[in-house]
Amino acid sequence: MKRSSLKTLAATSTLLVALGAPLGATASAAAPAPSSTANAATSASDSATGATAPGPEARALLAKARAALGVQARARKARLDTRVGLDHDPSRARLLAAIDPDAYECGPTVVDRWVDRQLASFTAQDRVILSILSVYDIPTYDALFFGSDENPAYALRDGKALTTSFRTLQRFWDVRGDDIDLMAMHGSMLLDAPRVSRTYQMLYGLPRAAADELAALLVDYLRAPRFEGGDHPLFTLNALAFTTFGQEIGPGRTISDRIVMGDGILRAYRELGYGDVAPQMILAHEYGHHVQFELGMTTPSTGESPETTRRAELHADASSAYYLSHPRGEGTQWRRARRFLPVYGTIGDCQFASNGHHGTPNQRLRAGTWAYELQQAARPKDKVLPAATFRDLFDARLPTIVAPDRP
Ligand SMILES: [Zn+2]
């Protein structure tokens, strides 16, 4: 049977862990999630009602998008979002949702406020276009499908410190890590029509000509100065760990394990005053997800529930804190790190019952504090626990970490 590579990818148990996104894209997650793109477009359209009429450029783009991205194409992308976990990414959900300040259940956090300030640079029409055209997802999928650490287009900006931490992490945890591509995703790729087109072809199964046409119109639209040459931070507000568990995503095509760091997420925490600790902590958190892949904590058949997602996220937080405070890791910074943990990954994450729930700020802080104290109490101090031992100790502690603040 001949299948397109995209279809094959959707049929495999590809797994991606976005910052704050869930684990467990499973083959059994058959019930198709409602098309987040469609929903988002709807809600954004609602919020746009009564706004200034779109200009001719925007009208042409929207008409083309509606013609090209039919029900089938959108369903295909929705399935892919589910497979890779993007549909549960809280920061993404926040970008796609209409902003209603009264809708906060546990915020707004400083990160929410930062996101709102960035969103203010978009018009209502922009919001519709960015949703319908999946602009928030294009750099992610571009990096996942086409990126490599040998391609300068995916090189980290000012990546020297991160590369050093990455090498340290590879030595720190006793699982295989030499097969990971560490990459950046840059929003500037959104002005590169061929790259946008090939991503559309993958995501939506569009014929090349249609994807080229759509990409050309989008690139023109995104040239407006408010999009910062594509480098608007909301276009890359994410970090991801990814594996296909060695499965082919198309005939003869494999994708290496990878960790992708979005420029936008690094910028967000830099502007919030965490630039000294956030890059290493986010990288170590994503590396923690890689450890989970290697230990089999996450498998192609891992079920998806708030509990499994929360365990994975809190384990990644604990791994990150352990590494950061350990003399053979970063060896510093716990006082700073403990202030960063509660704000990390909490963008819009008030949906405690959703599959994408990552733990409350208090739970994340408790997971990190537990790991720090574990490291502090260890003798000799420079001994690094095997990853499997660390996991077992973490699992034993998990009930305490997630216990209600007030019983
Ligand atoms: Zn995570």
Image (cartoon, rainbow, N blue to C red):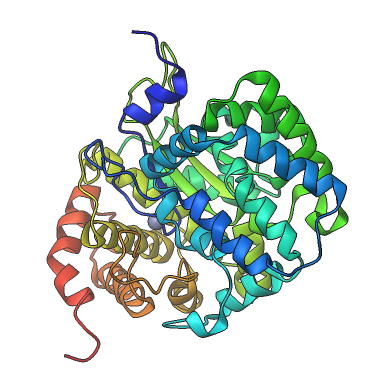
Quadrant, the N terminus: top left
Q: Looking at the image, which residue sits at the far bottom?
A: 406
The quadrant holding residue 120 is bottom right
Q: Looking at the image, which residue sits at the far left?
A: 396
Asked whether residue 223 appears in the rendered view, the answer is no
Q: Residue at x 72, y 26 (%)?
A: 212
Quadrant, the C terminus: bottom left
Q: Residue at x 38, y 65 (%)?
A: 321
Position of residue 396 measured from the top left corner of the image (x, y, whole percent)? 12, 65
Q: Residue at x 45, y 34 (%)?
A: 76
Residue 290 shown left or right of residue 394 in the figure: right
Residues 179 and 331: in front is 179
- Figure label count: 0
Residue 109 lies, with reference to residue 287, above or below; the image says below
Residue 373 lies, with reference to residue 23, above or below; the image says below
Residue 399 shown left or right of residue 311 in the figure: left
Residue 142 lies, with reference to residue 9, above or below; the image says below
Residue 392 lies, with reference to residue 295, above or below; the image says below
Position of residue 88 measured from the top left corner of the image (x, y, whole percent)? 40, 55
Asked whether residue 217 appears in the rendered view, the answer is yes
Q: Residue at x 22, y 74 (%)?
A: 402
Ligand 1 visible in quadrant: bottom left
Position of residue 159 measured from the top left corner of the image (x, y, whole percent)? 65, 47
Residue 53 shown left or right of residue 280 in the figure: right
Q: Looking at the image, which residue sits at the far top?
A: 1
Residues 354 and 302: in front is 354
